[in-house]
Every structure is written in C-alpha cells, then in structure tokens.
Amino acid sequence: AMAISDVGLPGEVPWKKMSAEELENQYRPSQWVVRLGAEEALRTYSQIGIEATRRARATRKSLLHVPYGDGEGEKVDIYFPDKAAEALPFFLFFHGGYWQSGSKDESAFMVDPLTAQGVAVVIVAYDIAPKGTLDQMVDQVTRSVAFVQTRYPSNGGIYLCGHSAGAHLAAMMLLANWTKHGVTPNLKGFFLVSGVFDLEPIMYTSQNIALQLTLEDAQRNSPQLKVAQAQPVDPTCRVLVVVGQFDSPEFHRQSWEFYQVLSTQTLCQGEWKASFEQLHDVDHFEIVENLTQKDNVLTQIILKTIFQ
Ligand SMILES: N[C@@H](CC(=O)c1ccccc1NC=O)C(=O)O
C-alpha cells in the first residue's frame, strides 16, 4: 500500500509512513481492545455509561439539561454531593466519540465516586459532527467552562477532564482566550485521558468523513502545535496526561508527545505542572468505565489531585 506522505523526519512522525489501512487501524480504538471484540467493547462502554447515568440521576441531587448557551445542544447536567459545602470543587467531563458520537446522557461514569467525596460533577453536551464543526465544539466547551465559573463564582477549583476526543476539547482549554468570555475560570487541573492532541493524522482516516477537517482546521485545533501560545494560568494548575496500556501505539505517541511539549513549556515559563501516566491493564474504554469505581487508580489520582 502507498504511504500517506513521505515528508517529515524518519521516526519523528511515524504516522506519515503508515499505509492508509494501518493509520485507520491505529485510530480505531475498539480494534485494540483485547478482552472483548470491537463491537462488544463499544456496546459495553455505552451500557456502562447509560447505567452510571441512570444511577447518578436516581441517587444524586442534580440539575439536568441546564443551558450554558442559546443552542439546543448547549446543555450541562450538574450532580452535587449530598452534603452542602462552601467552595465546592467542580469537575467537568467532556465525553469522547471522535467528535461525532456520544452524549452527556450516557457519560456520567464518575458521578457516584466523586460526588460521594464532595466534588460537584458537570457532564457537558456539545454539538457533535456533522451538526457541529470542531471550531464550534471548542467554542461550546469554552462557554460551558465560563458558565460554571459565572454560576458558581466561589467554587473551590474547576477541574477539566476529557476522554479521547473529549480530552482534545479539554486540552484546547489550555489555549482559551478567557478575556473574550468575560470571566477567568478558577482552573486547577486537567485530566486528559487517552486523548488526541495533533489532529492531522485524523484527516486521513474515515473519521474525517463526518468531520470534514481541512489541514488549516486540523492545525488550528491541535493543542500539540498551539500550546506554546497558551494563556498563563494559576501556577498550581496541574495537567495530567494519561493513556491506557492497551491503547494503540499512535494514542501512546499522541499522549507522550503532548506531555513532552507541556513539560518543556514548564521549564521555559514555569506554567504547567504536567505529569504523564500509563495506566496498567486498561484499554481505551475501560480507562473511563473504571471511573465508576471508587477504588480505581484513576479515580484515586483524580481525588488526590483535587484534595491535595
Ligand atoms: N469508532 C471508534 C469509537 C471511538 O473511537 C470512541 C467511542 C467512544 C468513546 C471514545 C471513542 N474514541 C475517541 O473519541 C472505534 O471503533 O473505536
């Protein structure tokens, strides 16, 4: 098969040396699940998300479908801890699904263990493709963060977490121009779970049928390329980049290289307190499914980061 492109230094951008078929495979997370077949892995993920959401809505104090903008799709679900407290920490979750599937209504995975420990959890909806473009999704997510800060100005910190495509959206918040939104959110941490930070390879996969990214769109929306232009944040703000052991080599490379660019910046400007974790024995879907469990490694990392 023909390579996509022969430009770039050998070893530096390995995806440019891949056949179209190999690239497609690297960017299809369900193909890398070892415990189940691809279809069953996707079905299980969706079932666990639906069940966690049903349970969260039945057992937690919540505000559902709260608008953060005028658009039909611009809604959040907010889940509260049982005990009222001042300076509640807020944890926002951006679901994955390659910017073209998933919804807030099946993504309340972490609500039970986090609200039990005193964290308010906000599950954010955004307009997936083809209705929404990447630029619109980034703008929506930015407004959802501004909304939480405006509505809860005495929050005890805002933590952003995204999975896969949602980790991309969360990472774009490192670049947001908050003055344009009239509010500076009290950002204290980012949890970027199995994310994509350089969108260019996505253009050459079937994911781009719905996304219709041009090279300019991909570059403008790639935190890997743009993070050098990031706005300064609270010097105590942490950025955790995590990937699952069974994520594909391209997903590992994406996370590692984004962590590298963040930590280089830390040296230059002293801004990002970045760390990198490869989570043992989990794939692209289990890494989030396990957030339903209070004793899971990532749940514990999140709680420790919030309450350190
Ligand atoms: N069509 C993809 C699905 C996928 O990538 C995905 C599904 C649910 C949550 C996150 C995903 N990946 C990135 O956003 C696959 O077969 O793996």
Image (cartoon, rainbow, N blue to C red):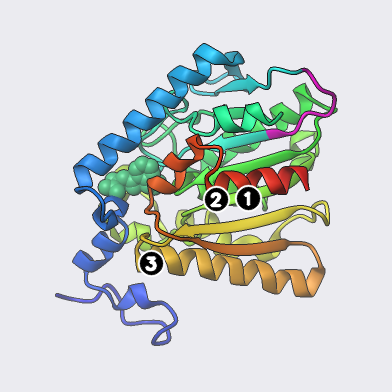
- 273 in relation to 102, above or below: below
Residue 62 counted in the magenta span: no
Residue for badge 3: 250
SS class, disc 2: helix
Q: Give the distance between the C-alpha atoms of the residues marked 1 and 3, in whole angstroms.
A: 24 Å
Residue 93 image offset from top left, x and y in percent: 56, 36
Mark 1: amino acid: Ile
Mark 2: amino acid: Val
The extreme front residue here reads 295
Instruction: Residue at 28% x, 53% y: name it.
Output: 33
Quadrant for the N terminus, please: bottom left
Instruction: Residue at 67% x, 52% y: name it.
Output: 174
Residue 59 image offset from top left, x and y in percent: 54, 14
> Quick one: 30 or 234, which is closer to the camera?
30
Q: Is residue 260 left or right of residue 56?
A: right
Q: Give the residues drawn in magenta, as a range.
A: 84-90
Residue 222 image offset from top left, x and y in percent: 53, 58
The reply to whether callout 1 and callout 2 are in contact (CB within 8 Å) is: yes
Can you tell me whether the CB of the residue at mark 2 lies under 8 Å from the nearest atom of ligand 1?
A: no
Residue for badge 2: 297
> Quick one: 231 or 156, which is closer to the camera?
156
Can you tell me whether the CB of the residue at mark 1 lies under 8 Å from the nearest atom of ligand 1?
A: no
Residue for badge 1: 301
